[in-house]
Image (cartoon, helix red, strand yellow):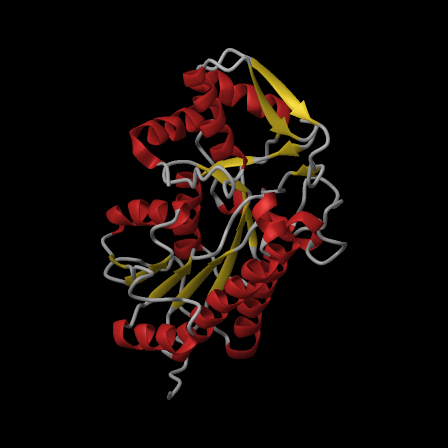
Amino acid sequence: MTREPAITGLPLPFDLTGRRIFVAGHRGMVGAALVRRLKPERCEVLTADRRVLDLTRQADTADWLRDNRPDVVIVAAARVGGIAYNNAFPVDFLADNLAIELNLIVGSFAIGVRKLLFLGSSCIYPRLAPQPMNEDMLLTGPLEPTNEWYAVAKIAGIKLVEAYRRQHGADFISLMPTNLYGPGDNYHPEHSHVPAALIRRFHAAKLGKAPSVTVWGTGRPRREFLAVDDLADACVFALKSYSDGRFLNVGTGRDVTIADFARLVADVVGYRGEVVFDTSRPDGTPQKLLDVSRLTKLGWTARTELREGIAAAYQDFLKGGVR
């Protein structure tokens, strides 16, 4: 395949009007939020169902990009899941995520995509990184073992984006979101992340009038939670206003203990029983709080308060958002 050089050196702000924007992973929670957020931008949103395009297949991805010619690519596609799922399927988490990001990033450069946005995860940071974690802490210590396969893949994506900018001047950028929740989340009983898992568990306990609900771990670890629609807004902001080799953290800059978060979810759901903590289960990283000062200085901050966001997520769950 003949490579067309990426167009670089475009002035900021980068105008999205009239652009063909490919949201890879549009059926996931993040991708769906991006599609919602892009509607008022007067751009053309391109999507491809996984039944039509398997992003782990290099030739198929390259052909789709060549045939559809997006101006902008957002890499929101990934294999994701909770601690237990990461531990059980390390090959899937490492190999599939490496393949998806490699195929999209390499293929985008090959057709001259004007801008690419890669989405990582806060699990890229060392397990015992000083808090809050700023962007310079990447690769300064060992990763959290319970999700290192996913983290390694995301670090590789960040570095590939950085390498294309350094070697070829491509206008490729990366954002690093904290823990997400919101409409369209995965409520699978085994494969979901903390917010969705707790919403499902407390809802089931309320309906079943269970006297208690058990939560993994001690409840002491601290986590930061970001509404997915806030992340989508940050992505649009970055596409328009940011062009630099350094990735940017995206979060609220505030965290909460798992115990307090579990009680908040229980209260929103309306569960009045006891919350019990299973200390035999792993806690994961003791604290994950992002330093979001770089993005804040650029002019973007999260807007959704945690209780408000969890309430919206619960309403989505009740409307049939379970999958």
Relative to 237, residue 22 above or below: below
Q: Residue at x 50, y 68 (%)?
A: 99
Relative to 230, residue 169 above or below: below
Coordinates of residue 84 in the picture (x, y in percent): 60, 44
**Which quarter of the figure is the N terminus placed in?**
bottom left
Image position of 38 (left or right of 131)? left
Residue lying farthest to the bottom in this orientation: 2
**Which quarter of the figure is the C terminus placed in?**
top left
Q: Residue at x 25, y 46 (%)?
A: 40
Q: Toward which corner of the image does residue 17 lie, by quadrant?
A: bottom left
Image position of 229 (left or right of 271)? left
Q: Is residue 112 visible?
A: no
Q: Is residue 106 visible?
A: yes
> Which sits in the foreground, 274 or 229?
274
> Which sits in the foreground, 196 or 139?
196
Q: Residue at x 33, y 27 (%)?
A: 318
